[in-house]
Image (cartoon, grey):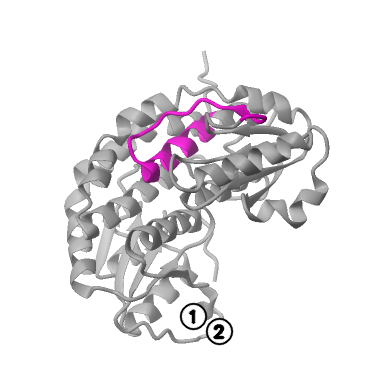
Amino acid sequence: MTDQTTFMRREVAEIPQAVARLFEQSDAALKAAGEALRQADPRLIVTIARGSSDQVATLFKYAVEIETGIPVASVGPSIASVYGAKLKIDGGAAIAVSQSGQSPDILAAMKVAGEGGALTVAMTNDPHSPLAQGVAHAIDIAAGPEKSVAATKTFVSSAAAALGLLAHWRKDEALLRALYDLPQALEKALTCDWQAFGDAIGDQSSLFVLGRGPSFAISGETALKFKETCGVHAESYSAAEVMHGPMAIVTKGFPVLALSTPDQAEPFVVDAADALADKGAAVFAASGKVKTAQSLPVARTGHPLTDTLSLVTSFYSFAENFARARGLDPDQPPHLRKVTETR
């Protein structure tokens, strides 16, 4: 009998093992890069990435700014590859995230960042890639081959690597413990059943995903995957921003997914979720604190930053099922390919 399991399903199921490999194989490299950041003591950090990798960079941005107060800005790769501009980052650091390590625009931006005086660090799934070979510190995320076009295990491994870099840099033992224990929590995350949200979506073609703080990065990745694998036009919003203009298109039964972790932003996400539910939207929240919205099961990890990775793992498992239920092949999204070499 032919195995009908999708590549995406296999790779989602492998997320716990991929994260375990990351810390077995690359923890020393993360520690060395963290020590380099501690010695450099940067006053500014720039991130360079696209697509799902840019959502990893957003998670890193929030985590660093919350934990250190150091501003983190996303640099558009085209400033180097298209416009030929130089970067002045003397005394700063540049962090690149790229699964393939091959995109010419990412390579060009990291090159000018290094020439501009930045300490350069890259996280990639190919330690022999041009990106890994061209930076001061290369982190192999050790996710293994990923055949599905949709990035799942490479996203989680990249995000875990980014948090590991921060943990070693700041010598944050609580975050390190949560990262080392993360594979067990992710096994539980795979069993969280979010089908009720799929039922609420039905045949609708548009929805909102909400987050705030670190969970806003996960809402961005979730919205991207809805478009990529499920044929749904999903928009990611801050739980603060959605209460302004976007509220105008919310009608009865409009699907909303609210993502939160148990940090200082959770009450604001909960308030937004309940407010939208009060207006008739079909709101499902990854929080047990909502009153009007409906709660989804979550697997907590012992730290609000690593909880973001539990949330996205549960979502990936849901998305693969939801795509197939819609008659779609999540391994073959229309018009897309695995490696996008933008310039």
Residue at which label 2 appears: 83
Q: Position of residue 126 (x, y in %)?
A: 33, 54
**Residue 134 visible in the snapshot:** no
Q: Position of residue 141 (x, y in %)?
A: 32, 49
The C terminus - image quarter: bottom right
Residue at which label 1 appears: 80
Residue 329 figure quarter: top right
Q: Secondary structure at mark 2?
A: loop
242 vs 114, nearest the viewer: 242
Q: Is residue 294 found inside the magenta-colored segment of the image?
A: yes
Q: Position of residue 136 (x, y in %)?
A: 24, 70
Name the amino acid type tagged 2.
Tyr
Q: Secondary structure at mark 1?
A: helix
Magenta stretch, residue numbers: 291-317
Name the amino acid type tagged 1.
Ala
Q: Is residue 39 found inside the magenta-colored segment of the image?
A: no
**Which residue occupies 62% across, 29% down?**
291
Mark 1: few, some, or many residues within 10 Å (few <14, many ≥20)? many
Q: Position of residue 206 (x, y in %)?
A: 75, 42
111 is higher (above) or lower (below) than 190:
below
